[in-house]
Amino acid sequence: MLPYSGVAYAATWQSSIALPSTVEYDSNPVLLGDDAKKAVTRTIIAPDFSLVGTSDLDELRIGLGLNVVRSSDTSIVRDREDPKLLLGWQRDTEKGAYGLTASYVESSTLSSEVQETGVIATDGTQKQSTLGGNWRTAVTERSSLIDEVEYTNVDYDIGSLTPYDELSNQLSWNYTWSERVELFTRFSARRYEPKSGSGVASSNSYTPTTGFNYKISEQLEVSAYVGANQVSGSNSGPTGQGGFNLHYAGERFDTTLDASRSTIANGNGGFVESNNLRGTWSYSIDELSRAGIDTSWQKTKGQSPSTLRNFNVWASRELSPFWVARLSYTYKQRLQDGLPDATANVVGLTLTYSYPEL
């Protein structure tokens, strides 16, 4: 920890550094049909630095990252140097808190974070800029109001995808029923504005939901919510929305099961409905070794309906207090209307250096 003090200001700073380096073989990174697929070997170095400063009621967060990729075949997967910048400020008040956030992230359209929005494309670049604000206040001893507003600009460098702006606001009311049970209700309103001249219409999305968080025991927690969504300009009425999450954290086991249906903005033109099912399981073999399985299933409706399945098995070993090695294997499958089914096998070895506090 690095303290800094002045005449009228005193702050405490904490910083962390992570430097993962990965060598990865991907038999079909673009997820083309068997007749057209080509393999690629990638080398990925992704340094990440974070800095957190606290002073009285204020907290400042700064994050800097870079994702450097070198490909064995740049006609399929580009060489990349994708930057990431995160800024956040939060102030506590007598009854709550408020704050501001900003971020800029570049990523490949082949990354899992982009494909989770239903985007299926060749290797291009997504540039995402976000500005957000949040406010929270206690209404009574047991209840509180939370409001979160966010503006997002998403741009692409390939013509098959539509750049867009999204403005969202979510108002939540939380009520602490007991030490173990929290009830909540939320209302989310979002505006989708495509790039001028794209031929895609603007639209609004409205989603009311209600649910609960229940701490069954010190190791087991569950949460669930139900609601509906209506998108303006759609020919259908409201559609059901909801989610369920179960998390168990034991001495050696850690398991999560998550299922949800949500409406999200994407680069294929407007809001789309996304159904997701995810499961994770990990086991501590000993003090230095851990193994796990991650699985996911996603079905996205829209102009190009698609289904993505992922199965990942991994093992990690702590080599020293600062170094961790991880070996992983992933099987991917994509089913999309009008295109041949596609599969891929990915094998990766990652060596990560991290220093949690400087």
Image (cartoon, rainbow, N blue to C red):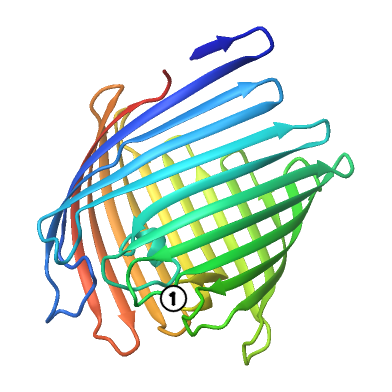
Question: Looking at this view, is 53 or 138 the one in front?
Answer: 53
Answer with left or right where residue 225 lies relative to residue 35.
Answer: right
Residue receiving disc 1: 299
Classify residue 283 by image quadrant. Answer: top left
x 45%, y 70%: residue: 163
Q: Residues within 10 Å of mark 1 (few under 14, many from 20)?
A: many
Task: Give x and y (percent) for residue 106.
Answer: 38, 53
Name the residue type under label 1.
Lys
Outermost residue to the right: 140
Question: Looking at this view, is 130 or 255 the one in front?
Answer: 130
x 38%, y 61%: residue: 126
x 10%, y 56%: residue: 72
Numbered-mark total: 1
Classify residue 243 by image quadrant. Answer: bottom right
Answer with left or right where residue 225 lies relative to residue 335.
Answer: right
Task: Give x and y (percent) for residue 346.
Answer: 20, 59
Task: Give x and y (percent) for residue 328.
Answer: 23, 50
The residue tagged with tag 1: helix, strand or loop? strand
Q: Quadrant of the C terminus?
A: top left
Question: Looking at this view, is 75 or 18 the one in front?
Answer: 75
Classify residue 329 by image quadrant. Answer: bottom left
x 15%, y 79%: residue: 34
Q: Where 70 falls versus 197 (above or below)?
A: above
Task: Give x and y (percent) for residue 349.
Answer: 19, 44
